[in-house]
Amino acid sequence: MAPQTLSFWFEFASPYSMISALRLFRALTKQTSTFNTATLQGIPSCQIPDLSEVDVVYMPILLGPIFKASGQQMLPNVQVPLKGKYMFHDVERTLNLLGCSGFPRSRPATWPPNTVLPARMAWLLAQGPEYIHAVDAESNLRPSTASEKQQKSVLKVVAEFVWRVYEAEFIANENIGDPDVMARLWDKFVVQGFKQDGNVQMPNGGRAVALANLEVVKSGLKGATQEAIANGLFGAPMFTTDDGDMYWGNDRLLDAFAHCKIQERINQPLGFCAQNRQPNL
């Protein structure tokens, strides 16, 4: 039986998406936490998912249009000051359990950054090397298929790049909207990543920044965000399943994986996303 697909919808301004990105990166690269692994098994928000029966598709989005479409104010988690303060505290302690220190204890003055450029570059990367080379050559711009996006060698590079962008933003306090910062991250984790895993040649960071500003890539990210709106997404991280269901939040990541593995036993006519596409139901 073919593995089920789980789509990971994330926004680089979302601290909770950062935790999910780290957990998926650890799962794909088989890294472990420096913290007691047995202890983490009792903490759902920290456990590393089992990818043996599930393929992950990375779906970068922009939350601004999603908040607007769902009738929310911008940055809903910080509209209540205590809620915003708690969010940064909660993310810090969860990352500490995962062996990642340095997350800011309070909201940085520079947060949220402009995430358009990193989101475009992540979307482009998630399409896979063949698509990137086609964009670079201005040739066949056929969108990548799900199977191409799910190739393990591609996923490992995507997972590390996404995590490293979060790390640069929240741990190193770098401006991920800066083309020079993003070009450096691309060179280190994409160019070198593909070179080490199969010796695949990729455009350098400066060229990747330029590609991210092409209309075809802009349209790709816009399309992903519009797809998220059509599916009823209202925040990040979100996880959607093959049968049209949805799970919201880093703490529901394991539930989403479990859904993929037992969905034939879930007695529901339509998942949340499918219902949203048929609003009269």
Image (cartoon, grey):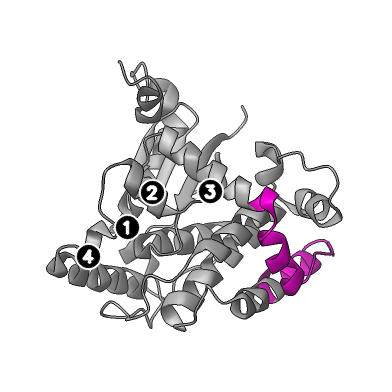
Residue shown at 26% from the left, 43% from the top: 71
Do the numbered discs 2 and 3 sit on residues whose CB atoms are within 8 Å? no
Q: Is mark 1 on a helix, strand or loop?
A: loop
Do the numbered discs 3 and 1 sit on residues whose CB atoms are within 8 Å? no
Q: Which residue lies furthest to the front in this view?
A: 215
Left or right of 67 in this view: 193: right
Mark 2 or mark 4: name the one nearer the start of the chain: 4
Mark 4 or mark 1: name the one nearer the start of the chain: 1
Of 87 and 181, nearer the camera is 181
Q: Distance between the residues labelled 4 and 3?
A: 24 Å
Give the label on residue 20, or none: none
Q: Distance between the residues labelled 2 and 3?
A: 15 Å
Residue 64 forms part of the magenta stretch: no
Residue at label 3? Answer: 59
Residue at label 2? Answer: 253
Magenta-highlighted residues = 188-217
Residue at label 4? Answer: 78
Residue at label 1? Answer: 45
Q: Is residue 127 above or below residue 161?
A: above
Amino acid type assigned to the residue bearing label 1 in the image:
Ser
Quarter of the image where the N terminus is located: top right
Chief secondary structure of the magenta span?
helix
Q: Is mark 3 on a helix, strand or loop?
A: strand
Quarter of the image where the C terminus is located: top left
Q: How far apart are marks 1 and 2 (CA)?
A: 8 Å
Q: Distance between the residues labelled 2 and 4?
A: 23 Å
Amino acid type assigned to the residue bearing label 2 in the image:
Leu
Q: How far apart are marks 4 and 1 (CA)?
A: 21 Å
Q: In this view, does 86 lie above or below 6?
A: below
Answer yes or no: is residue 237 visible: no
Q: Position of residue 43 (x, y in %)?
A: 29, 59
